[in-house]
Amino acid sequence: MTALLDVIATTARFIEDKFANEGSGHDWAHIRRVWLMARRLAAAHPEADALVTELAALLHDIADWKFHGGDYEAGPRAARAWLHSQQVADEVIARVETVIREVSFKGSGVATPVSSIEAALVQDADRLDAIGAIGIARAFAYGGHAGRSLHDPAIAPVVHDSFASYQKNTAPTLNHFYEKLFHLQDRLNTDGARAVARGRHAFMEAYVARFLAEWDGED
Ligand code: ADP
Ligand code: NI
């Protein structure tokens, strides 16, 4: 037991150090929130393996394909190397790798099924961090990082029905709400996450309504 708790604490420190100076939206603060939320959601799911859930939450963004030339296996591979160095059992490593493969959102029209309760919890926790007050801040931070404008009424939001189309998207940040953020409450796996999403979704809707009113000088 001690050894298992140790590997979670050691992994948290490893990821905190690795992401200390990360400004792309995959910072330690994001990962920490996903870890805490996955643990909170897991309280209603005693069938979930705590070690797999926590390690996957901590390692889910270890090597994002967006920053590794589109290599989707970079994340699972980096997680495996780390967990192997920590003498984690192969069976646990394989389950963590599968969670990492399944977590990511790939476009509003693209299904992202999960094959385990642990993946369901981490995917929900990651999606909850993309909505609400934090989600709004992360979207504009990402948009600024990528050199996007805030909004352009001439550019209509689109439904991305393939991962490739979603990846190529360079639309202004407000479009991201219609292309991803407003869809997330319907793309959750657990009742606990849906309950948390309700307030966050309503807050984003009010925010965007006000944004558009202010855009036209109406409020
Ligand atoms: P996740 O960590 O949820 O898999 P991503 O890696 O896709 O999410 O994105 C990290 C953060 O940046 C999220 O908050 C996401 O909503 C935001 N983001 C991703 N793509 C865009 C975009 N085109 N415009 C604005 N924000 C974005
Ligand atoms: Ni994430």
Image: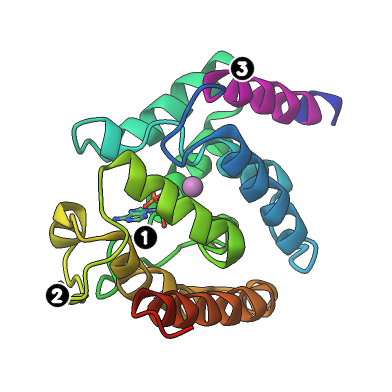
Q: Which mark is residue 154?
A: 2
Instruction: Name, please, the residue furthest toward the right.
Output: 2
Rendered image: mark on residue 86 = 3
* In the image, residue 171 lies in the stretch drawn in magenta: no
Q: Which mark is residue 105?
A: 1
> Could you say where residue 113 lies in the image, as x and y percent from the top left?
39, 68
Circle 3 residues within 10 Å: few <14, some 14–19, many ≥20: few
169 with respect to 182 (left or right): left
The residue segment tinted magenta is 5-19
Applied colour scheme: rainbow
Question: Quick one: 215 or 13, which is closer to the camera?
Answer: 215
Count neighbours of disc 1 (C-alpha within 10 A) and say few if under 14, some if 14 to 19, many if 20 or more: some
Q: Amino acid at mark 3?
A: Gln
Residue at image position (14%, 75%) is: 154
Q: Is residue 164 visible?
A: yes
Looking at marks 1 and 3 on the same chain, the residue that comes earlier in the sequence is marked by: 3
